[in-house]
Amino acid sequence: METALESFFVSLPLAVALWLFLLLAIAIAVVTMAVPRRAAAPSPAEAESIRYAEEVSVAATRAAATAARTRAEWEAAQRDVDAAWEAFEAADQAARRATRAAAYPLMSRRRKPGENAVRQRYLHHAATAACRNREISIAQLNDVLAHRGWNPRLHPVVQEFHLRHAIRAHRLAEYRAAQDHERALWETAEKAADALRSLRAEATIALARAATRPQPADEHWFADQWSTGEVPATA
């Protein structure tokens, strides 16, 4: 067989024989590079880098969920602030109407027997209804029922004036509390967003470090040959 090959190549022109040898060498090199190589086992330092990158990625995922939750809570608090302000405006307008109604002097006349009890029942009923509608607080209702700062013998028009102003004060307190709550949730959401940005940056760096592993020596050799143009020319 060797004699047949030798006679075959001898019969060919020298240039054609060189082309065949060159093509054969290139084919062998391509097949060698295409054969899958078993990845080298990572070193302890590389394994630690990969583990750290995975932990930071998990932490970033959890931080994203926390940031989304805190932002949703802050947006809900913003809506509560708007609702509290609308309730205060309505209470303020009602208090202004009661003030205008109380500006007219009442006729002084002798009260009928039992009229003071009727006025007291009216005050208690109106205050209880306002508390049931969450227009005044339980503490304000207790003050009304105990007559602390409230005169149950006043005319119902005057009682309505004081009750409307109590409702206005309660709505204002609710609005300010909603503002404080919204501000606290905004700070919490900002801290969560900062933590998320920091963890995402750290996860990106850790993943880049874990993905950067040294190549085998033969891969370095082929890369150097192709980059420097030292592959044998076919011309």
Image: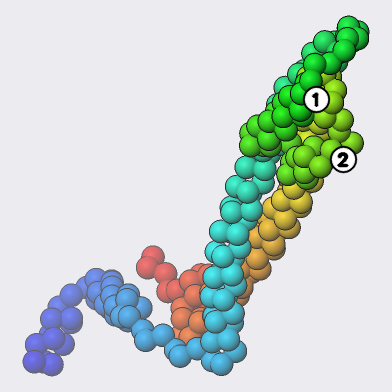
> Which type of secondary structure does the marked residue at label 2 adopt?
loop
Q: Which residue is mark 2?
A: 148
Quick check: 33 left or right of 59? Answer: left
Provide residue 40's location: percent of width, then percent of height.
44, 89
The residue nearer to you, when weighing 59 against 90, is 90
Report which residue position mark 1 lands on.
Answer: 116
**Hey, what amino acid is under mark 2?**
Arg
Q: Specify whether 25 is left or right of 4.
A: right
In this rendering, would 49 be left or right of 40?
right
- Within the image, what quadrant is residue 199 found in? bottom right
> Which quadrant of the figure has residue 108?
top right
Q: Is residue 193 visible?
A: yes
Residue 231 percent across, percent down from the top left? 45, 74
Question: Relative to 153, is 140 above or below?
Answer: below
Relative to 162, residue 61 above or below: below
Of labels 2 and 1, earlier in sequence is 1
Tag 1: residue type? Asn
Identify the residue shown where x is 87% and y is 30%. 151
